[in-house]
Image (spheres, helix red, strand yellow):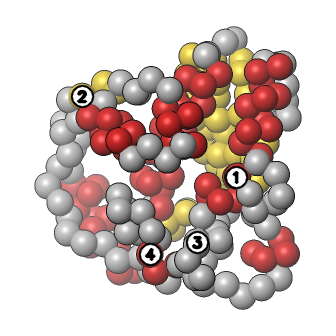
Amino acid sequence: MSSKTKIWDSFVENGEVSSAYGYRWRSAFGVDQLDVVLKKLTADSSSRHGVIMMWKPDEDLLKVQKNVPCPVMFTLNIIGGKLSTHLMIRSNDMILGNPTDIAGYALLTHILAQKLDVDVGTLTVSISNAHIYENHYEIAEELISRLSKTKRVDFYLPLDSYDRAVNLKDSLVDEIKAGFKNYLPGPSVGPIKIAL
């Protein structure tokens, strides 16, 4: 498991997280979807075939599993020289899942735009079922009571981020973290448990 994050540790089976998004993007369907989509968009920036699936009906619909993907697919489109992402989420925990998904897919959009040598467009998110678990109610009330002190966070993406990520360069994570300027997080709300 990664030394950078522990959030998925409880979902490890046989040394891997089969519902993890990177696994689904890169190998679960017998094709590296991300690589194919990048090649399509490089060859034809107007392509509407930039679709990445995470939902595997043979596993997620037919088998009872501990964890199935919440984001089920996303599309990538270059419009007006800008890469935009549309993320579709079947079920979204607004305290843990949503902030992680928004930040992660925003970062992914920046990384892919850099790889495609285009500007960053918009991230659009469609959620079929947005919810707050009962054990998160107090945390939600605390977060709602706070006002953001930062209106805009400046961000610098390290060069060659996509290729470095593919090649598992550990230093990339630290460089990405260092690339956030004027980010002023509020006080911790304490540990948040995943509701299973």
Q: Which mark is residue 9?
A: 4
Q: Quadrant of residue 39?
A: top right
Q: Which of labels 2 and 3 is toward the front?
A: 3
Numbered disc 2: secondary structure: strand
- Residue at label 2? 181
> Residue 156 vs residue 141: left or right?
right
Identify residue type, mark 3: Val
Q: Position of residue 119 (x, y in %)?
A: 57, 16
- Residue at label 3? 17
Numbered disc 3: secondary structure: loop
Residue 193 in the image: above or below residue 106: below
Query: Which residue corresponds to the image point at 14% horizontal and 55% vertical from the top-left?
Result: 187
Instruction: Choose the circle earlier in sequence order: 2 or 3.
Output: 3
Instruction: Choose the circle earlier in sequence order: 2 or 4.
Output: 4
Q: Which of labels 2 and 1 is toward the front?
A: 1
**Is label 4 in contact with label 1 (beta carbons under 8 Å)?**
no
Q: Residues within 10 Å of mark 3 (few under 14, many from 20)?
A: some
Instruction: Choose the circle earlier in sequence order: 3 or 1.
Output: 3
Q: Position of residue 58 (x, y in %)?
A: 85, 75
Instruction: Choose the circle earlier in sequence order: 4 or 3.
Output: 4
**Is label 3 in contact with label 1 (beta carbons under 8 Å)?**
no
